[in-house]
Image (spheres, grey):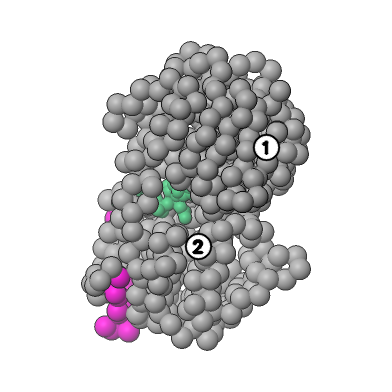
């Protein structure tokens, strides 16, 4: 594949930024919001709570939570998007009460929210679980500052607590905090709303609570996982792809791994070119919290190893069940052996096209890439997973010469290998 792709706004930055509107009664204007199913779900959830929402012609979203009348995030929305848990912190901080359905199982593991709840209890919330709902109240009326040490690095846990602490009484310290760029982007947005936060991007964040926050205008950072996915697309098809409007500094781990695989990568300020003239070399992958190798890029690199020269291990440290794509790749002729959270991948000359099924957002991206390099036709089913996190992926791939189309009826994109 050869061509140019514009990278959209980050899904995992847009969601918490939009939720932070609950912390103020003033307008929050959010630019570069990607057009994705998870964003639509977030806006629907905020709407249910009474938040006013407008999208202007430049797709800037204006959200205003002055009239919030409900404090309950219903199951039918939460079950489609576990990030709905991000309303818990802001609702407790602003209104002293919240009800959020438990997220339920997700394809990539149980995905508990115990660390969110434990930390909010440390700030004075009283939390119970009744008929599948987290019910939380703040008896004193206002959350109080606490020193919180997260047992495990949790991205949305850090985000939830940063939002809760921004209106709490006193100075909250978050230790073993997540360092992801999306956490930093939320901190930037909260600071522009008047929050007093320091240390975002490190593993210790300090938040000095305010009595209220104001409005702001915030532009969401580019999506580093969308960017990484297209970088792998360029590499596995031995082509040349230039990505525009991205933040190259957020992709160090991915760039390093692709260079190890033999790709040539040139970096500009907000653009990057991947070119690959030869078959990729297999590279070992071990996922870790940022700035380590991102778990959201594991499936894409597993695919690259499936068609690479040599063999390598892929170890998933973040989620206990994020190898659902392996069985689908097996059906395409991949040589992968699973041993607990480690996969041994031996490169084959060519995958064979097949009918495969998407299971989670990033696994489905890996299968789409597999279809680009497999012989004859691959059909990826259940791509609603894909639509949660990629905006018009087939159009962007078509622009680079891929032979891909979305089959009208049940959104079944038919893929053909690039001849
Ligand atoms: C965020 O999920 C992202 N989602 C995920 O992206 C990403 O894969 C993940 O972080 C890891 O980087 C959003 O930002 C909306 P975690 P999150 O809490 O916050 C355990 C995508 O494809 N844990 O950092 O839910 C958890 O089970 C999505 O865009 C607890 O045990 O992930 C996991 O093993 C997929 N208890 C580990 O921590 C808790 O209370 C990291 O999870 C919270 C988490």
Give the quadrant of the N terminus. top right
* 97 left or right, relative to 200: left
**Which circle, 1 or 2, is nearer the viewer?**
1
Residue 183 visible somewhere in the drawing: yes
Q: Residue at x 30, y 79 (%)?
A: 137
Residue topped by disc 2: 16
Q: Is residue 213 visible?
A: no
**Which residue is the site of mark 1?**
404
**Left or right, 57 with reference to 26:** right
Could you tell me residue 398's position as x and y percent?
Answer: 73, 38
Q: Is mark 2 within 8 Å of ligand 1?
A: yes
Q: Residues within 10 Å of mark 1 (few under 14, many from 20)?
A: many
Q: Which mark is residue 383?
A: none
Eyeballing the image, is 183 above or below 52?
Answer: above
Rendered residue at 55%/23% (across/down): 352
Q: Is residue 174 above or below residue 365?
A: below
Is residue 248 positioned above or below 111 on the image?
above
Residue found 32% across the figure and 41% down from its top: 320
Numbered disc 1: secondary structure: strand
Q: Which residues are magenta?
A: 133-150
């Amino acid at each position: 594949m050869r061509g140019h792709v514009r990278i959209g706004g980050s899904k995992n930055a847009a969601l918490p930024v939009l939720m932070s509107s609950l912390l103020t009664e003033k307008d929050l204007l959010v630019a570069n919001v990607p057009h994705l199913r998870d964003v639509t779900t977030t806006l629907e959830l905020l709407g249910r709570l009474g938040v006013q929402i407008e999208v202007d012609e430049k797709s800037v979203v204006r959200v205003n939570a002055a009239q919030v009348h409900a404090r309950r995030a219903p199951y039918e929305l939460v079950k489609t998007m576990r990030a709905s848990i991000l309303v818990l912190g802001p609702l407790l901080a602003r209104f002293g009460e919240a009800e959020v359905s438990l997220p339920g199982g997700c394809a990539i593991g149980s995905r508990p929210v115990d660390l969110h709840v434990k930390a909010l209890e440390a700030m004075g919330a009283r939390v119970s679980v009744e008929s599948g709902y987290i019910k939380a109240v703040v008896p004193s009326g206002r959350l109080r500052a606490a020193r919180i040490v997260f047992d495990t690095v949790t991205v949305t846990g850090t985000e939830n607590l940063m939002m809760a602490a921004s209106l709490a009484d006193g100075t909250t310290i978050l230790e073993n905090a997540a360092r992801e760029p999306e956490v930093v982007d939320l901190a930037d947005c909260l600071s522009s709303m008047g929050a007093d936060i320091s240390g975002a991007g490190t593993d210790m964040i300090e938040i000095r609570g305010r009595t209220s926050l104001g409005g702001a205008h915030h532009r969401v950072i580019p999506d580093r996982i969308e960017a990484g996915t297209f970088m792998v697309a360029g590499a596995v098809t031995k082509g040349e792809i230039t990505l525009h409007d991205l933040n190259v500094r957020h992709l160090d781990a991915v760039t390093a791994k692709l260079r190890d695989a033999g790709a040539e990568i040139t970096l500009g300020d907000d653009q990057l070119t991947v070119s690959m003239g030869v078959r990729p070399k297999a590279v070992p992958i071990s996922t870790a919290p940022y700035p380590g190798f991102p778990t959201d890029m594991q499936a894409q690199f597993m695919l690259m190893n499936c068609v690479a020269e040599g063999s390598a291990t892929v170890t998933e440290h973040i989620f206990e069940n994020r190898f659902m794509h392996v069985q689908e790749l097996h059906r395409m002729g991949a040589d992968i052996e699973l041993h607990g959270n480690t996969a041994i991948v031996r490169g084959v000359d060519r995958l064979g096209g097949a009918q495969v099924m998407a299971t989670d957002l990033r696994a489905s991206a890996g299968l789409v890439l597999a279809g680009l390099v497999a012989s004859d036709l691959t059909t990826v089913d259940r791509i609603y997973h894909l639509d949660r996190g990629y905006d018009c992926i087939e159009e962007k791939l078509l622009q680079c010469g891929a032979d891909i189309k979305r089959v009208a009826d049940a959104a079944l994109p038919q893929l053909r290998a690039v001849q």
